[in-house]
Image (spheres, rainbow, N blue to C red):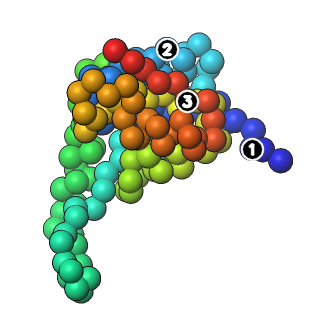
Amino acid sequence: MPEQPDGRIVVGVDGSPLSRAAVRWAARLAALTGGPLEAVSVWEFPALFDPTGLVPPPLDGFAAERRAAAILDETLAAVLSPATAVRRRLPAGRPGPALVAAAAGARALVIGSRGRSAPPGAPLGTVALHCVDHAPCTVLLVRE
């Protein structure tokens, strides 16, 4: 039996202009539905080229996680009123699969149609395509 939505509105945040627009849309949707707002910024362990596979990645302070947290905080501060209740999440992993996992049980996942790494003029980025194909809930794509 499919899982019933818990009412959460999940929004993906990467610091791009479309991500900021997605946060605005998600906040409005959460206010309209009465569901909680959850902002998710995904980070990945730094890649380390080691053909032998014997050298572990550096774990000196998790700079990637700190950068994702800063992007999330900066975006939410720039877009939302300080009174807006929002849960912050910082999962590690590849962005598409991590956002799909974060959206499990949610009412909707709101994301920008392209993120920071999409080529200019591309109608959809790879993360947006992954989410549309795999998310377990409604996906709202925010375009320019």
Q: Nearer the viewer, residue 30 or 42?
A: 42
Dot 2 alpha-carbon crowd within 10 angstroms: few under 14, some 14 to 19, many 20 or more: some
**Residue tagged by mark 1?**
3
User: Residue 88: x, y in percent?
Assistant: 41, 39
Quarter holding the C terminus is top left
Q: Residue 85, how many percent across, how many down?
A: 45, 26
Query: Amino acid type of disc 3?
Result: Val
Tag 3 secondary structure: strand
Depicted 2 relative to depicted 52: above or below: above
Q: Secondary structure at mark 1?
A: loop
| Residue 87 on image: x %, y % | 45, 36
Q: Which mark is residue 26?
A: none
Of mark 3 and mark 2, the one earlier in the sequence is 2
Q: Which residue is mark 3?
A: 139
Q: Farthest right residue?
A: 1
Q: Secondary structure at mark 2?
A: helix
Q: Nearer the viewer, mark 1 or mark 3?
A: 3
* 116 to the left or right of 109: left
The one of 66 and 137 positioned closer to us in this rendering: 137
Task: Name the amino acid, label 1.
Answer: Glu
The x, y position of residue 39, in whole percent, is: 42, 35
